Image (cartoon, rainbow, N blue to C red):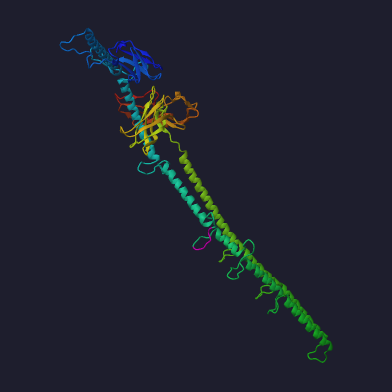
Amino acid sequence: MAAYEEKWYTGSTSVGPYTFTFPYIKEADVKVEKNGTLLTLTTEYTQSFTQITLVSAPLSTDIIRIYRDTDNENLSSTFYPGSAIRSSDLNDNFTQSLYSSQESAEDAKDALRATDAFIATTSDEGATWVTAGNNTNASTDPKGVGYAVTTSEAADGKADAAVVIAETAELLVHTYVSDGLGNLKGDGISPNPQGVKYAVETAVAADTDATAAKLATDTYVHDGTNLKGDGLGGNPKGVKYAIDQVETYVHDGTNPQGDGIGGNPQGLKYAIDTANTANDNSVKQTGVTPPGGANAAITIAENAKTVADTANDNSVKQTGVTPPGGANSAITIAETADANATIAINNSVKQTGVTPPGGANAAITIAEDSYNNAVKQTGVTPSGGANAAITIAEAADTKADNAVSTANTASANATAAQNAVTNAELFTPYAAVSDIPSNNIASITVTAGGSVYETVPTVTITNTTGATGSGATATAVLTDGVVTSITVNTKGNNYDNGATVTIAASTGTDGTDATATAVLGPVNEEKAEIADSTGLETFTPLTGKPAGFILGDDGLTVKIKYNTSSTTWEWVNYYSNDPETRYRKKIIIENKRIIDEDYAVGVDNNGFSVGPVSIANNKILTIPNNSTYLVL
């Protein structure tokens, strides 16, 4: 419309009044819009001739438009046969037609200008079409058909790239994680890599070892409350059995045990008692045949002395006896008796190896043997002796140590497997530097859950004014008719000025009042893997880039991660996509002596043949720049 038919106001925060200069027939023909929305007279604004006053002050970003929209459905004045015709009524009708014509003509011009600006323009002959609305200059050129075509083509290219990335990601998941049918992948069996299946199986094996170690400990050593391994009722012989053997055969911590009385086994106590008895017998025994013991020898000597004394008396007093007697005979008898007594005494002290044994040494030997057997004996059933019990205890202790070692090893393996899974870093793949996340939708916070949502509402993410982001999608989570959370499915990119989240019920009457706000990323520790690092040398913000990295390349993949505390991407590492093409040129080996077809050495490759080599007539061997063809 022409300037006299509308008036625009921008950047104002006042209620007015806002003036306009175009003429109008009646007050209802004057319209007021704010940001393209028609306002209502009286409730949202008031009019006084050529002045408009708003009820509420606008924002500085609001656009106020005052324009004329003349009624073109009803005539201002109607004439009837025989009635008077006033010039003012005729003028009003003609003015109404004039204003309507002006507004229609201006609308047509606006439509033509919109077509020229947003769709296409033609030559005067109407034969040449030029696409418009390419947004080449963002400040003057709008986004129209041209921009839409270009954007859709770019989006199609990104979609193709996204498909490739998704297929690559799917391949990695199917290789390292799962095949989607409930089967874990990545068992580490050549040529398969070590993935989730390997980690799970390693953890299960470690858990099995730990369980076995605990079972061995609970069976042979201790169950956490009682000693185990008593060797009774099918139970194995472990620590409890060893301790019981010591307490039964050797010592209970206070007294020697194993006296062999009343069903008790013969152990250390029995050996000591037997030794003591044998020793007592060697000292005190009398009246044994053959005689033994010191007392028996003394008795014999005393009896011999009595006989000698009697013989001596007889020898002094006796006369005329046959056989002859006398002192000499008595002395001889006494000496013989004394010699016999000495021999008896010596035998009682020194005699060994006599059945039954006799003499103090024999008794001492028996006692020593009994004691030694009690201390040293092993491998006897029933087992006895301290060493046997000690040996059993040491074996049980060794088994316990082995069980603890096995448990520790199993625990370490389980921890290592868990750490391997926990510490595995997964980087999100991106095709190019331009795809690195910038102001994406990291998460969505529900500020009001609303109510009475019978079905899951639709979540829409749109740019705020001036933003150029796209690609973000999200899904609402519904609990008892209330939106409790929103899951971000795809984060999108380039929401530089923020994003608006709209929650709309799936039907017109289903649920109301849910609201949410977008939280921009990238988030802390977000990881990106860029397959084509071309241009990364100028990408910002990025820290930690190695000094040797001068230019990015389509043959170099770079890994980076985001740090929110320093608000910058940090360099992780990089590697060559194909080391052969990145670090050395490939060599093409020709086996033919004659090249009988057109042949071109690949760019950045070298040809190699064993000569002589000849090229057939009219055939071309092409060697590009930076390549060679060597003939030996």
State which quarter of the image contains the N terminus.
top left
Q: Residue at the top extreme? A: 87
The quarter of the picture where residue 490 lies is top left
Is 396 situated above or below 171? below
Is 189 situated above or below 389? above
Q: Is residue 136 visible?
A: no
Q: Residue 70, how many percent across, how many down?
A: 26, 15
Does the stretch in magenta take in 1?
no
Q: Residue at the front extreme? A: 83
Q: Residue at the bottom extreme? A: 320
Does the stretch in magenta take in 229?
yes
Q: Is residue 576 left or right of residue 30?
A: right
The quarter of the picture where residue 132 lies is top left
Q: Is residue 450 visible?
A: yes
- The residue depicted at 66 percent of the width and 73 percent of the height is 353
Q: Is residue 356 left or right of residue 458?
A: right
Q: Residue 612, how many percent across, how many down?
A: 36, 28
Q: Residue 57, how many percent across, how many down?
A: 40, 19
Nearest the viewer among 537 and 561 is: 561
Q: Magenta segment, principal secondary structure?
A: loop
State which quarter of the image contains the C terminus.
top left
- Picture mark count: 0
Is 77 situated above or below 251? above
- The residue depicted at 44 percent of the width and 43 percent of the height is 199
Q: Residue 342, how many percent across, how many down?
A: 76, 76
The magenta stretch spans which residues?
A: 228-233
